[in-house]
Structure formats: C-alpha cells, structure tokens
Amino acid sequence: MTHAIAVRGLRKQYGEKLAVSDLTLTVGQGEVFGFLGPNGAGKTTSVKMLLGLVAPSAGSGELLGRPLGDVNARAKVGFLPEHFRFHDWLTGREFLLIHGRLYGLRGAALEHRIDALLERVDLADSGNRMVRTYSKGMTQRIGMAQALLNQPRLVFLDEPTSGLDPLGRLLVRDLIAELRANGASVFLNSHLLSEVEVTCDRVAFVKQGVVVREMSLHESVQGADVTLTIGADGADALRAGLAQFGAAQSNPALPAPGTARIDLHVSDESRVPELARWLVGQGADVYGIEIHRRSLEALFLDVLGEERTG
Amino acid sequence: MNSVLTIALLTLQEARRRRVVLAGLIFGIGFLTVFVIGFGLIYRDLQLAPAARSFIPPGVGRNPATSAQTQAIFLEFVAMAGLYAVNFLTVMMAVLTPIDTLSGEIQSGAIQSLVTKPARRHAIVLGKWLGFWSLIAAYLLMMAGGVLLAVKLIGGLNVANVPLGIALMLLEATAMLSLSIAGGTRLSTLANGVMGFGMFGMAFIGGWIEQIGTLVGNATAENVGVVTSLLVPSEAMWRLAAYNMQSPLLRELSFTPFTSASVPSSAMIFWTLGYVGVVIAIGLRGFARRDL
C-alpha cells in the first residue's frame, strides 16, 4: 500500500535563512498524523512544500503515490491554510461552489455536496450570507468545508481549531474521526497539544524542519513510568529481581517512614499487573503502585526543551 | 479550460461585488454626460457663428477651408479629443483594476486555497487575465461607443474606420493589462503600479519626442520614439488608431495628441500582438515558479 505522504530529505533555504533543513517522514493511509514543534520550527514551510506551494531546495517525496507538486494528486487532497483568507465578498455557498468547480465538480452532485457540508459544519442557515460577515469561527468552519468538498484521501489542517470555541473544536474532532473512519489520512498542524493528544494516531516533533522524535499515541511504545512504594525492609533485595521488568532507580522524594520508593520504567503498561503479582509473590509489603502517563505537553517540553538547552 | 473560466467568473464577480462595475458605470456615464453637453454646446455655437474658420492655422490644407469644412474639422477635433480621453481612461483602468489581483492575494494568502486545487497555476493567471480583459473591453466599448454615438446623433459626424480604431485601442489596453497582471506575479502591488504607470509614461513621452523629432527633422529623436514604442507599444497603438479614425483634413493639423507627424507602421500591430503574448508568457512563468 502506498503511503499518503512519504518525503525524504526535504530542504528549504530562503537566501541565507534555512527554514527546513532535512525533513523525512511518512504518513500512512488512514492515519491521523500530528506535526508538532515550536514557532519557527518550519512547520508551515514544510506543509507548503508538501502541497506544492513552495518548491523544495532539495529532497523529494510523494503525495498519494505521486510526486510532490503533481496536479492530479491534488484532486484527492484537501487543505485548510493556517492564516486562511478567503474571497470574503462571496457568500458561503458561492465560495464552496467556486472551490468545488476548481476540484472539477459540477452540477447537481456539487450542489448536494455543498448542502451536506454546510449542514455538517453548522452553517446551513448562513450559506447565503457573505463570508465577510462571518465570525472567525464560522470562517474557519467554511474553510473546513472547503477542504472536504472533494471527499479527499488526504487532508492538511494547519491550526484548524485556533479560532474555534469548544463546540467548534468538538466538530473538528468529529470530522477528523469521520475522515479516519473513511480511510482518509489527516496531517494536522496544531499548537493545541490536548487536541492533538485526543485526535492523532502518531505525532512527530520537529525543529528546524528536522523530525527530532516520532511516536505513536496508541501503543505505549514509550513504555510507562511506575513508582513503587514498598516496605523498606527487603527493598534492596527486590531491586535485582525488578530488573526483569525494566530499569529501576531510587526515587529522590523522601518516602514515608518505613517505606522505600523505587522508580521503574516498564516497557509496556500491560506488564504492571504481572509486576504486582511478582512483588506480592516475593513477600513484599506493597503500599502503592503508581503509573505515570506523560502528557503530550510534558513530552513536548522534554523533547524540544532538551533541544533548546542542548 | 474549465478552471480558467471559473477564475474568470470569480474575477467578474469580484468586480461586481466590490463595486468596481458600479463605479465604472457611474463615472463613465458622468464622463459621457459632460462630453454630450460640451459637444452639443460647441455644435450649437458653430451653427450660429460659422466664422470659426479663423481658428484654423494659415497654410493648413492645400486650399482654404470652406466654412462647412471648418465646422467639420472642429466637430471632428472635439470627437477625437473625446476618444483621446476615453483611450487614456481605458489604459488607466487596464493598469489599475488588476494591479493587486495577484500580489494582493499572494500577500493575504487567499491564493493558497486556489493554487492547491487540481488546476494548473497557469489557469489562475489566465482566468484573471480573461476576467479583467472582458471588463476593460466592456468599458472601452461603452465609453468609445458613447462618444461615437453622441457625435453621430448631435453633429451628424461619422468617424472613419471605427472597428479598426476601437480594435487598436483595445489592443493598447490589452498590452497594459497584460503588463499589470504579469507584474503582479512577482512585484508588490505598489511596485507593480509604479512599473505600469512608469512604462506608460515612457511610451507617452517617447511618442511625443518622436513627433517633435519628425517635425524638426531630427532622426535621432525620431528613433528614440521608435525604440520606446517597441518597448511599450501603447502610445503607438493610440496614434495608429487616431490616424485611421480621422479625416485627411484633420490629419494635416500634424501636432495634436491625436494627429501624427510620424504615423506608426502597421507592422506595429503585429509587434504589439506578439508583445502581449510574450508578456503573458513571462507572467505565467513567473507565477508558476514562485513560492506562495
């Protein structure tokens, strides 16, 4: 199966300024992919290269199996730009009509599609109003409808929820879920990490256009951090045996009297019950087993913070 | 092709929604009203005082002009002045109306959602060109048609070679429109305006230097004019249009904005057609290659 996106060594240099140095990534079909990084990390330039808006200085890649910039691939691609400015002297319906025609859609099929989309993004009552009279959230929703006109196989969303209220965000989240259910891929550029956390299958952290870390948000490939609180007696004896579950080290926090704390990084959260049984089997006094799931925000700060200080 | 038409329709819709069409109509009608009043007054005065012949410079025409001829020259002079103004306005419109259509949308980012559609970038430039060209052609037809109709109905004057004259004026406006659109693919709106009017001004002064050079017999000055006409053929197209639309008698006045001491060669028509083609090609290339 071809990838939705596969790029190798994309680079963009504007004169002296290096916007993206070496972008290599793949996004599978039906995958919701989060593209994360601090401001100025080259995220928007990367998206523009993928969409053929900006010509890469070096590197190559394919979108839906066709080379970057290929006109035909775009028939199956949707895009909501970051600083979306549309022709706001059009009504919402006319706006979708023009963009639908540019996708090669015509006649009754296009009209039906527009009706369905206006309904879907809660703009059915505002379709005949000029886009310039829309609120920021409405403009963003009509932009979202525009990106879905052609029933795309791949959708690029650049900060799709920045202007939306919680209901609008929920709508975008649902739309992304529908796209995934239909087997479409989504490339999501967002600062709202909580948003990314609930919608994305996989994320990449980028800095200067280099992917510094890539991870799945479903399988706990990163493992889990566990803090054990056990009776102080025999704690040292247990350490050697704990090694079978993962690397253990003493927790620097002062334990309650008579107890010891051990931090353990297990390869998979599913091993925790096994760990509990083993501890009990060893006769240890178990006071607590805490699992720490790290939020995406913590990860973001870890991954990119290191880079910043490093 | 469908995308070109879609963008052309979008452009026309923009002109309508942003009141460009309305403003053009209102001020076009204003212009024609002033022209009709002025032409009517002059016509009435000439009927009352045919002695206007004394205004004709001595030595013009092989034979002294008759009173009827003098009247005809006067009316034709006013008619040509009207067309001269129409020509100037049309050229201004051709440079101004499309001036920010590409640069503005590139700057605002509105172009991004168009360019990422499955249409070639060429289609966007050509669609905009076609949309604005239709507007400019309609404007020229309305304005020149109004002037020609007024002189016919009020003074009974039949201007010669009207289809050729209008076609040449349209070709001139087309050249300036193409420059403005091609400029917008690379330049900022302001720089594009400076370029468009700068080139028009260069052709304008070049045309005058050519006329004066011919009159005083200075071949170098004449050549300066010819070279500027090759670089920007707008003024040459107007002079050719004016030459074809006026009577032999008026042509002999030799030194007005619409008579020519040196008449551009008709080969300039082919040059201008080629010029339009090359300018559009440069615009397409510029837009196809730039980062958006």
Image (cartoon, coloured by chain):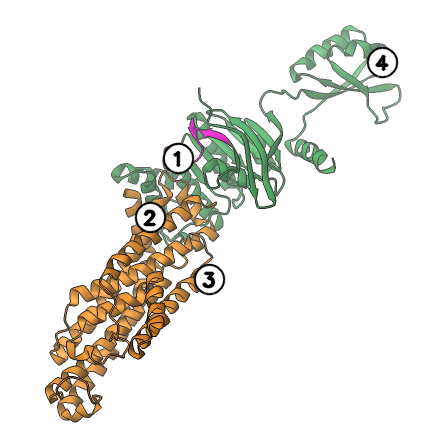
The label nearer to you, 3 versus 4, is 3
Q: Chain of mark 2?
A: A
- The verdict on residue B8 being magenta is no
| Amino acid type of the residue that numbered disc 3 sits on in the rendered structure | Leu
**Label 2 to label 1, Cα distance in Å?**
21 Å
Identify the residue under disc 4.
Answer: A235
Q: Nearer the viewer, residue B198 or B218?
A: B218
| Amino acid type of the residue that numbered disc 1 sits on in the rendered structure | Arg
**Label 3 to label 4, Cα distance in Å?**
77 Å
Q: Is residue A85 left or right of residue A299?
A: left
Chain coloured green in this rendering? A
Q: Is residue A39 left or right of residue B69?
A: right
**Are labels 4 and 1 on one chain?**
yes
User: Could you tell which of marks 2 and 4 lies nearer the N-terminus?
Assistant: 2
Q: Is residue B27 left or right of residue A2?
A: left
Percent coordinates x, y for residue B87 in the rendering:
28, 69
Kind of element beneath mark 3:
helix
Residue B190: mark in rendering? 3
Identify the residue under disc 1.
Answer: A74
| Amino acid type of the residue that numbered disc 4 sits on in the rendered structure | Ala
Q: Is residue A89 above or below residue A4?
A: below
- Over which residues does the magenta segment extend? A60-75
Quick one: label 3, few (<14), some, or many (20+) residues within 10 Å?
few
